[in-house]
Image (cartoon, grey):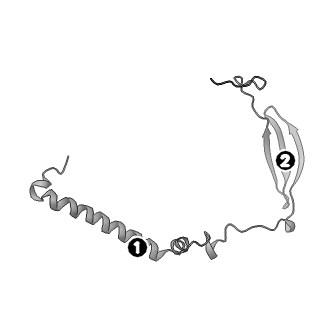
Amino acid sequence: MNNAKMWLVVSPTVGVPLFLGAVAVGSFSVHMQVVKNTTWVADFLQGSASGGEEMASATILDETSMDAATVSYVMPTGDGLEVTVILPDGTSAKGILTMPETMASVDVHTPLIVQ
């Protein structure tokens, strides 16, 4: 231990409670500042819904007013199907739809029996 000689100067019956008290005071002050300087902690402790009035990023979209994207074409590839999607603003995006893998060790027709 690096600070073993400290106990020759400070008695452990004084040093240990002093150290633990300093940790408790520091922890309490940090938690108090979090409660004072944030709005969500008080809302959480009162049981309000998360986000409150500041929940702008998770708004529910009205799907009836949205233009739908259309699939332009589907082309088979070695890995699966390549799909080109035309978005409402005219841009296009490509995606590859892969088929589910069948593992060599899995036999669908044989039931698994564990004893």
Report which residue position mark 1 lands on. 32
Amino acid at pointer 2: Thr
- Percent x, y for residue 32? 40, 73
Element class at badge 1: helix
Q: Residue furthest left?
A: 8
Report which residue position mark 2 lands on. 84
Pick the residue in front: 86 or 81: 81
- Percent x, y for residue 16? 21, 59
**Is residue 9 depicted above or below 1 in this figure?**
below
Rendered residue at 51%/75% (across/down): 42
Please indicate whether residue 85 sits to the left or right of residue 114 in the image.
right
- Percent x, y for residue 8? 9, 54
Residue 79 falls in image quadrant:
top right
Pick the residue in front: 115 or 39: 115
Please indicate whether residue 42 sits to the left or right of residue 75 in the image.
left
Amino acid at pointer 1: Met
